[in-house]
Image (cartoon, rainbow, N blue to C red):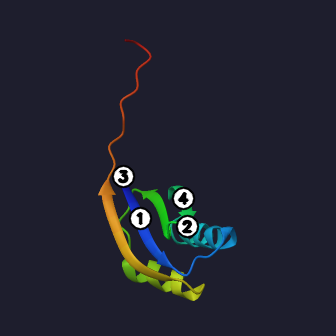
Amino acid sequence: MKKITLEIDGMYCSMCEAHMNDVIRNCYPKAKKVSSSYKKGITSFLLEEQVDRNKINKAVEEIGYQIKGIQEEGVQHKAFSFFG
């Protein structure tokens, strides 16, 4: 699983955050932990599949924002045990 962080230009309020979250969920229905921060200018989410940069750029631009950068980093699952 990868953590995807998008640097977004054009978000100015909590409604902008909601619009970005909707775009991610529409593009990638299997995305997990989708969140946006207009104060930081980022949207992040977890995804199993590869990000299609053209697809995501087009979807974000259609709602009036611009992706300034995309960062992908691997996420390791933490082992959990009920027994010591």
Q: Residue furthest front?
A: 39
Residue type at mark 1: give it: Thr
For residue 35, side relative to residue 82 (left or right):
right
- The residue indicated by pointer 2 is 39
In the image, 65 versus 57, the foreground residue is 65
Q: Of the residues tagged 4 and 2, which is closer to the observer?
A: 2
Tell me if label 3 and label 1 are in contact, CB under 8 Å.
no
Chain-order first, disc 1 or disc 4: 1
Give neighbour class at mark 4: few <14, some 14-19, many 20+ (Cα, 10 Å).
Answer: some
Q: Of the residues tagged 4 and 3, which is closer to the observer?
A: 4
How far from the left and from the top, in percent, is residue 8? 48, 76
How far from the left and from the top, in percent, is residue 71? 34, 66
Q: Which mark is residue 34?
A: 4
- The residue indicated by pointer 1 is 5
For residue 52, side relative to residue 19 (left or right):
left
Tell me if label 2 and label 1 are in contact, CB under 8 Å.
no
Q: Secondary structure at mark 4?
A: strand
